[in-house]
Amino acid sequence: MRRFHRSTPRDASRNRLWVFIAVGLFLLVDVYLVSTALTSSRADNSLPAATTVATLAATPTPSPTASAAAAVVVSPVPATRILAAVSATVAWRAVSGICPDPLAAPEVSTDAGATWTSTDANRPTEVTALQSISASNGSVAEFVGFAQSDCSAQVVRTFVGGDNYSSLKDAADTAWYVDPANRAEVHGPNGLQPAPCDAVVALAPGSGDEAAVLCADANVFATTDAAATWSAPLAVPGALTLTVTPDGYLALAAGAADAQPIAGADTDTSCLGLSVIDLSAATDTGDLTATTTGCYDTAEAPATLAGNVAVAVADDTLWLWIGDATVRSTDAGQTWL
């Protein structure tokens, strides 16, 4: 029996082969195009972020300048420390506060501030919150504070370098002091008198009826009649504390103060620390004028310094108590020892 075989034309088989080849090439091309598109998309998406990072990294951060530092002005606050100099080598110091704290524990140095000897004034007298020191030498010193029992004003003295203290009866009646409980009044030789401002933060008693005060608004006033009258205000921006000198008064101000340039220095010189400012009174009016004489460089922020520095002058030596250091200057603050 004859079998019939199905035969495929040669031309049809060749055509089918080309179809398979074409389909394969198309798929390869398609895969390549899809892959390229995805890679391009990822590159485009990452480019802006990379550009931004590079731009930020290349932008410098401005460094602090003298002008920027001088623009930082801090308001004065009541001091937490007091200092009195006797000579170039002898000084007394103490921590201050509001009665009944802290207990009075003055310190004395006889080696230019290299070491300090602690004493106990509270145990024999119950004095607290010392406000001022008046010293004659390393053995004799007088302090104004407040009684621990009722916070009344109290004056105590030592004749033996702090080994013992005694209260001076009625001495507070004529003493210079400001009661932290009422800073709108000043007590002097004639008793309580109205202060020239709402809040006195520092008092610098001079001789007899003379004194100066630093107010919370950074104005300084002086009196020559036991606080009966006061001079015109002198604004000292950044002023932190005040002390008496043989020729007048001296203030410390954080940053560049609004006063005359430092003597012998460039007019562009700015103080990036504590400006030393000499305050002198006119002989005819008693009004104060300010001259910047020196600078103590410190990286401490003005707000940190407020209330935490003390200054005193004796024998042409300027003493500064700042942080844990006690430093001195014999040229009005231009250089320090």
Image (cartoon, rainbow, N blue to C red):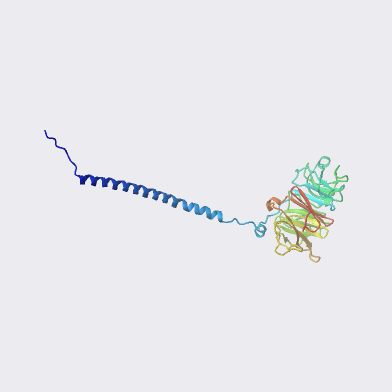
In the rendered image, the quadrant that contains the N terminus is top left
Is residue 288 depicted above or below 116 in this figure?
below
Q: Where is residue 52 in the image (x, y as percent from the top left)?
A: 51, 54
Q: Where is residue 135 in the image (x, y as percent from the top left)?
A: 85, 50
Would you say 210 lies left or right of 25 here? right
Nearest to the observer: residue 270 or residue 321? 270
Q: Single out the residue that lies furthest toward the top.
A: 1
**Label total for image:** 0
Q: Specify whether residue 184 is in view.
A: no
Q: Position of residue 5 (x, y in %)?
A: 16, 37
Q: Specify whether residue 145 is in view.
A: yes
Q: Single out the residue that lies furthest toward the bottom.
A: 284
> Residue at coordinates 66% horizontally, 60% vertically from top-left?
67
Q: Single out the residue that lies furthest toward the left.
A: 1
> Residue at coordinates 49% horizontally, 52% vertically from top-left?
49
Would you say 301 lies left or right of 147 here? left
Nearest to the observer: residue 45 or residue 35? 35
Would you say 28 lies left or right of 310 here? left
Q: Position of residue 240 (x, y in %)?
A: 72, 54
Nearest to the observer: residue 212 or residue 265? 265
